[in-house]
Image: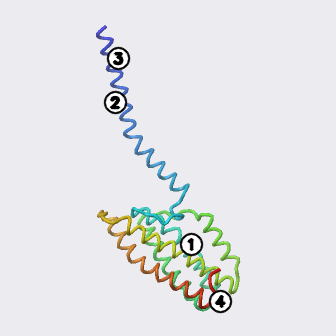
Amino acid sequence: MQNSDSTARRDFFKKSASGTLALGVGMPLMSSLLTALSAEASPLADSTQAATEKEFRQGVIGPAQLSLVTSQIAVSKATNKYAKEFAGFELEEAKAVTSVLKDLGTPVPAMNAKAQATLTKIKTATGAAFDKAYIQAQLENHEFLRDLAQNYLKNSVGKTSPAESHTRHLATLALAVFKEHVALTKQILDQQLGGAA
């Protein structure tokens, strides 16, 4: 009888230890999988909230890619000299930003519905309507990026890992450019293109 109790306890212990081990290994894996799936389901490009360097990088790369694609179109299609000049500057900035983010291992997400609609609008517009659509899209993009950088800098205060420190430095530099581009696009819209669309 005692042998049977001892065997039952041993079996229980073995099953408990195996279950605990499986949970210990499986939970982080499951957590990573759920994080990856939720990131794909609702990309950060729709939210200006970022608390980590990874969230910030993921939030920037989608809008930077949209700026790159639309600015490639605008450098040849823009008719307003200020819109064309801005497109040239923006194209070089977007190339640099996407290059740095890709070097850091940041994946480029598929364009969300809003980005696709913006791209379609820009591809199909011509003349002054094109200039206005392009500059309006750049204004909205840079307002988003400005807010993302400000929120990341606020939310990541006190984080001292090398990755966070480097990204905070990049966000600080980028914030100045984002603010400048918001002011420039507003000025072009108001003074050259008759106001916001």
Amino acid type shown at disc 1? Leu
**10 Å crowding of disc 4: few (<14), some (14-19), many (20+):** some
- Marks counted in the figure total 4
| Mark 3 vs 2, N-terminal side | 3
Instruction: Find out whether the residues at labels 3 and 1 contact each other: C-beta distance under 8 Å.
Output: no
Side of 79 relative to 20 (left or right): right
Would you name the residue on which mark 3 appears?
8
Amino acid type shown at disc 2? Ala
Amino acid type shown at disc 4? Thr
The span from disc 3 to disc 1 (Cα, nearest Å) is 63 Å
Residue sitting at x 51%, y 64%: 47
The span from disc 3 to disc 2 (Cα, nearest Å) is 14 Å
**10 Å crowding of disc 1: few (<14), some (14-19), many (20+):** many
Residue sitting at x 45%, y 44%: 30
Picture coordinates of residue 173 (x, y %)? 39, 78
Amino acid type shown at disc 3? Ala
Could you tell me which secondary element the residue under label 1 belongs to? helix
| Mark 3 vs 4, N-terminal side | 3
Nearest the eye: 193 or 102: 193
The residue most toward the top is 1
Would you name the residue on which mark 2 appears?
17
Picture coordinates of residue 71 (x, y %)? 57, 79
Q: Tell me the quarter of the picture where residue 51 sits.
A: bottom left
Could you tell me which secondary element the residue under label 4 belongs to? loop
Nearest the eye: 150 or 56: 150
| Mark 2 vs 4, N-terminal side | 2
**10 Å crowding of disc 2: few (<14), some (14-19), many (20+):** few
The span from disc 1 to disc 2 (Cα, nearest Å) is 51 Å
Specify the color scheme: rainbow
Would you name the residue on which mark 4 appears?
79
Would you name the residue on which mark 1 appears?
66
The span from disc 4 to disc 1 (Cα, nearest Å) is 20 Å
